[in-house]
Image (cartoon, rainbow, N blue to C red):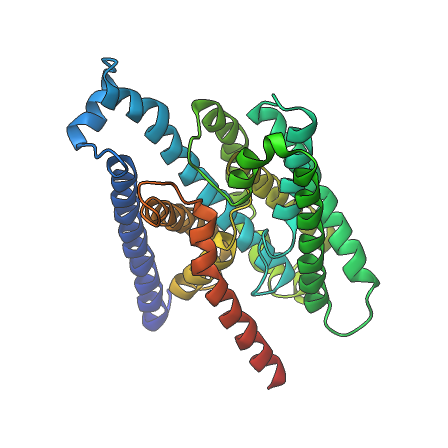
Amino acid sequence: MGKWPLHTSLEHQSKSRLIWIWIAGLLLLILCAYLSLALGTRRMSLATMVQALVYNDGSRDHVIMNTVRFPRLIVTMFVGANLAVAGALMQAITRNLLASPGVFGINAGASTAVVMLTVLVPHVTAHETVFAALAGGISAALLIYGMSSAFRGNHPVVNLALTGVAIQLMLSSVTQMMLIFNETQMDRILFWLAGSVASRKWEHVQTLLLWSLPVLLAAFTLGRAASVISLGDEMASGLGQKIKRTRGLISLVVIMLAGSAVAVAGPIGFIGLIVPHMVRYLIGNDYRKVLPLSALFGTILLLSADLLSRYVMFPFETPVGVVTALIGTPYFIYLARKRRKEAAE
């Protein structure tokens, strides 16, 4: 038997909408990438960008493009994608609108571990900081989950969020304490702690690509599992999903995505909170579609924030984490108030 005409029409509209969203997103990405390369203390033309990419003649413009702006562009794109996909997966497995690597303390755990390693080993490489970030992220996640499980009550999701915020504050205090006793590293680390993609080098690009590409691909294959588990444990079990194994695998992917992003660019907040909401509003709750689009719009949002950060105190750099915080904090308050109102009803 064929499909009902109405069902066929709705499916066609859904596919058409998805295609147009992808087209619009890719056009926005191209525009943001161009502006990221063109704008700064020294403006670059499209011809200069192409020439620097194809043939580096050693001129000042070509050196700036190849050693500063190209690496910065690639780092910003992958950090934005990592954080957005990590946030979408966290919101799926916790079924919490407020979930993100930053809010739940994973970023704080990763950044504390990186700062500790940097203080103890000043000449640490970018690749080595990723391992420290992963260890810190896993430790923070286990601590948060263990402490939230100890609380009694009918709101485990709320307990998890509140515990994450508390652990985040505690880890931030530990980080500040380490910096106070190691003033020689303070200026450089404080800028990184605010979340920054400035002065990223090809070493950082290589490290980020090594971790991000395979883990992002793994995350996209978990789209169906994330959709099922977001329906609730009982329904997911009824559909044949192995809850603990799936949640553990997704949690590991989240920590790897957030940890590698933090190791390279610092704890940039709110990308993982905002972007999944935007994407679900556009296309619904099918995570097979949500995850790739979150990567795309996470890239666009962080590129846009990075562009704004260059002009907040022009010609001086402002950490991009400050801009994302200015955007994300009001949105977080709105979501918290909305969730509280829904719970009261």
Residue 159, given in percent of the width and then of the height, sits at: 72, 66
Residue 90, given in percent of the width and then of the height, sits at: 60, 55
Question: Residue extending furthest bottom?
Answer: 345
Evaluate whether residue 320 shows in this view.
yes
Which residue is found at the position 65% from the left and 39% from the top?
Answer: 179
Task: In this rendered view, identify the residue nearer to me: 18 or 308.
Answer: 308
Please identify the quadrant where the C terminus is shown: bottom right
Q: Is residue 231 above or below residue 196?
A: below
Q: Is residue 108 above or below residue 5?
A: above
Which residue is found at the position 66% from the left and 45% from the top?
Answer: 176
The tally of labels here is 0
Residue 238, given in percent of the width and then of the height, sits at: 69, 63
Which residue is found at the position 53% from the left and 51% from the top?
Answer: 223
Evaluate whether residue 130 shows in this view.
no
Residue 1, given in percent of the width and then of the height, sits at: 40, 65
Query: Based on the displayed image, in which of its 4 quarters is residue 52 positioned?
Result: top left
Question: Residue extending furthest top?
Answer: 57
Which residue is found at the position 68% from the left and 66% from the top?
Answer: 157
Task: In this rendered view, identify the residue nearer to me: 253 or 188.
Answer: 188
Q: In this view, does 201 lie to the left or right of 66?
A: right
Task: In this rendered view, identify the residue nearer to me: 2 or 79.
Answer: 79
Query: Based on the displayed image, in which of its 4 quarters is residue 228 positioned?
Result: bottom right
Q: Is residue 284 left or right of residue 38?
A: right
